[in-house]
Image: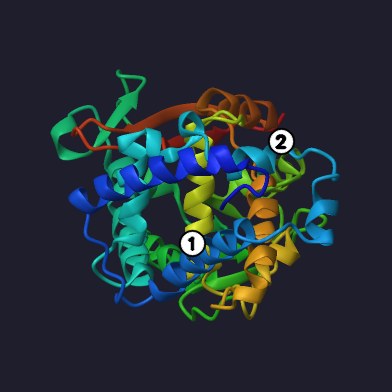
Amino acid sequence: ITNKKNTNTENRSNTSDCQHNEMRVKRTITINQNAPGMGRIFSQAWTSISLNKAKHQRPASHSEKKITTKKKDDFADWMCTWLIEQSLWSSKDYQNALLTYIAAQTSLNKWEDNSRINRRLQDLKVIFEFNSTFKSSNHPFQVTPSNLKQIVDRQKIKSYFDLGCGDGTITAGIGDYLGLSKENLFGGDVYEGQNEQITYVKINENQSTIDLPSNRVDLITSFVTFHHIDQLETSLSELVRILRPGGYLIVREHDCKNEHALRAKYLNFVHAIMMIAKVGEFANSSSNHNTKNENASHEDYENNANTWLTQKSSIIEYTRSIHYRTCAEWQQKFEYAGFHHRATLYYGADGSNNPQKLFYAVYQLDKRY
């Protein structure tokens, strides 16, 4: 994503910087341009470069001159800036992490699916099977508080709801691990999937309602979904309604301030790559995706130079709507809704990198009086 407002002097300087970064990237990572799912990303990148090169080689049109008079958009300027200190290329960690997505040697779609499904199940087994003798060498997490004897009593889980279940694959895997039948295995999203192993539940996004009876489930999971929810307090009230007292809420989220910083920009660019490549939560964007940003979600990200500027605008508007919070801020929201904190599991105990600052947090619903 590039900024239309750079001066010629800035462009020359930034071109030199980009060439330096390009050579550095070539020395560290070989990008497989022929991998399935990668063509769309490279086409969009080349289109962006071509459009900007052409724009700077000709006088500005009347319509472009009018654009400069528009109200200043700090978020768009921050996302599109070429300033090195605000660029992901200024951080080797973020640079390599971002290129991991677009340099995957297998299909990005397959890589994303394998990562999500296998890791989610392994992570949750740590939570469900954790006890006082559990060794940290057996899992990648730093667990707090340190004196825990148990996180979740899985024997009490007789029914389960997954908020933001996508295609239901992970939901079905968790249900199978817990020994739950389809009648007690629920998944909800803003569109209905086709997985026959789970019972899909309708979610009214505008009203933040979930089509389940009160006190219906013993466990709710939500994997990197809450930061997409506008009406968080209303949604949490619905979760409290359908969860039995003493039931569990397991959350996977980013520990990130909602500010113009590299961490938030990196997460936004990950979303952008997934949108263009149509993977993960955006895999069904051309047919049945119906998120709060309909213009962004229904956009057909095909290789079309005439629509790239529109697509870039859609990406900016979508990422603008994301609500990042720190781990402490998330905890404050959940506790205010009626949950008490049981455990937080941070990645990194095994020395692994965690550029998205992902963590798990487990909460238990207080008894109603």
Q: Nearer the viewer, residue 85 or 183?
A: 85
| Horizontal and vertical percent position of residue 50 | 53, 66
Residue 125 sits above or below residue 348 on the image: below
| Horizontal and vertical percent position of residue 328 | 54, 23
| Residue 168 in view (yes/no) | no
> Which mark is in front, 1 or 2?
2
Residue type highlighted by circle 1: Met
Q: Secondary structure at mark 2?
A: helix
Point 43% across, 39% down: residue: 88
Point 23% across, 53% down: residue: 26
Residue type highlighted by circle 2: Asp
**Res. 9 mark:** none
Q: Earlier in the sequence, mark 1 or mark 2?
A: 2
Badge 2: residue crowd in 10 Å (few <14, some 14–19, many ≥20): few
| Horizontal and vertical percent position of residue 358 | 41, 39
**Which quadrant of the rendered structure holds the C terminus?**
top right
> Cβ–Cβ below 8 Å for labels 1 and 2?
no
Q: Secondary structure at mark 1?
A: helix
Distance of label 1 from label 2 (alpha carbons): 24 Å
- Residue 160 lies left or right of residue 77; in this view the side is left
- The image quadrant of residue 9 is top right
Q: Nearer the viewer, residue 303 or 300?
A: 303
Q: Nearer the viewer, residue 184 or 135?
A: 135
**Res. 74 mark:** 2
| Horizontal and vertical percent position of residue 152 | 39, 39
Residue under label 1, please give it: 274
Q: Nearer the viewer, residue 364 or 61?
A: 61
Badge 1: residue crowd in 10 Å (few <14, some 14–19, many ≥20): many
Rendering colour mode: rainbow
